[in-house]
Image (spheres, rainbow, N blue to C red):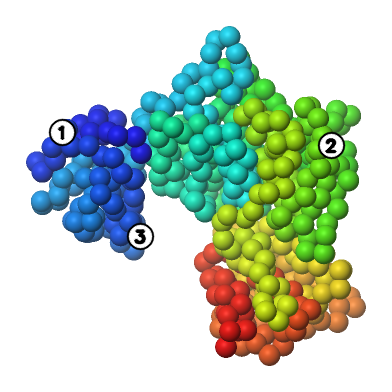
Amino acid sequence: MIRLTLAEIAALTGGTLSADATPDTAVTGPVVIDSRKATRGGLFAAVAGERADGHDFAAAAVGLGAAAVLAARPLEGVPCVLVPDVTAGLALLAKGVLARLVCPPSPASASPASAGLIVAGITGSSGKTSTKDVTAQLSERLGPTVAPEGSLNNELGLPLTVLRATEETRFLVLEMAARGPGHIAELCRIAPPRIGAVLNVGRAHAGEFGSLETVAKAKGELVEALPGAAGGGVAILNADDHRVLAMADRTSARIVTFSAAPRSRSGPRAADVRAAEITLDDLGRASFRLLMPGGMAPVRLRLHGAHHVQNALAAAAIAAELGMEVPAIADALSQAEARSGKRMDLRERADGVLVINDAYNANPDSMRAGIEALGHMISRGRRGIAVLGHMAELGDIAEESHFEAGRQAAEANVAILAAVGESADAAIRGARSVPGWQGEAVGLPDPAAAIDLLRYQLHGNDVVLVKASKAAGLWEVADGLLAEVDR
């Protein structure tokens, strides 16, 4: 974070200083919400969560060197900036810091690259984290970049990411998530984006949103927050998703479209950023010809799954707006790697078994993408096994979504479907509904049972997909299977 005194932090957050706080004490280190990560000169935000109240750990954070605590109540012997609500105070601090770092674009230029620090926001029902990771790897070639670690994309994660920026930062690449209407709009008030990319509208969090139309309305809050074209605003939209493409009517920003389809579904006008001649290797890594207004160049991704083509195109469109040339974009895309764990993370055991850990998150659309990647590897001669767990927050469509996942696994011709935990019955019924499927469907209570089932059944030509929402903890299966060869 930029250097701020406690008096400045109080001014930015609308807070007051406790009796133990000295106004000119400087915060020079990072802002954290985990007291164990407090460092000398940093600021600890005492967020009250469902399981623990950060105020109970404030003294420990100061003991580790934190200069002060952002708190909602006075704490004896602890220097505090006191605010009515710590989460809201964190947001105000991030907003205030960012305002000091972002320079308005030159009136003579509408190019985003003419600004100081540039904020790019990315949203969508799936693919946000992977696209953010790829985009950051491109922008890093142009200058110092700050992007979230993992999926820090909500009312806590986004401010914490913003507060990592310094005077040297040129690009702030932010992932923006929503659990309901208004959430992305609020994130955009904290960190107003100059570039906004919308990847897709899908059925993630269907229990909260209720309909795809409501999802589209929420995701479109990103483009509504952009400045107009004269102010350098750019909306990057997926032309292959009609709900995303319709968001062009909700913004006065300049529109840039991308498409992985043979021809953009938007009509006769081709998308601005396209992938042509897409092929997949034996491990599902895509190669294609990148077509952009600035030229064309070959790309060979290191990421597994055809769905990463669209993610790469969105990243390419953002990079072009930041000033990167097409050959450099293609080279950076070809070098980009997965940075966030448990997302199509393919590892090979010593005996040749491939384990795909995609267990950080799941919704019907990402589940389909993962199973399609598995199916491609099966079509190249490997025996496929799907270990599928619960997809959370789907509301009324939960049962049909898990039934569909089982059906998709059987249609991909998996040899074994191991359905773990709640919703296993629906997945098994879906698999068994596929005529002529010769595989085995097994319901299991927990990750340990899945490991026990597969322990003696895996062979060197097998590929195992492990996919579920984070709460299912199914990455334990991937970790356990990878550890088996070391026994």
At 57% across and 39% down in the image, what residue appears?
140
Residue density around tag 2, few if under 14, some if 14–19, many if 20 or more, within 10 Å: many
Q: CA distance from mark 2 to mark 3?
A: 45 Å
Write down the quadrant of residue 272 in the picture.
top right
At 70% across and 26% down in the image, what residue appears?
255
Q: Circle 3 sits on which residue? A: 50
Numbered mark located on residue 23 in the image: 1
At 34% across and 63% down in the image, what residue appears?
51
Q: Circle 2 sits on which residue? A: 264
Mark in front: 2 vs 1: 1
> Residue 371 vs residue 42: left or right?
right
- Relative to residue 245, is residue 202 depicted above or below? below
Q: Where residue 107 sits: x, y (%)? A: 55, 10
Q: CA distance from mark 2 to mark 1?
A: 58 Å
Numbered mark located on residue 42 in the image: none
Q: Are marks 2 and 3 in contact (CB under 8 Å)?
A: no
> Residue 285 vs residue 171: left or right?
right
Q: Is residue 203 visible?
A: yes
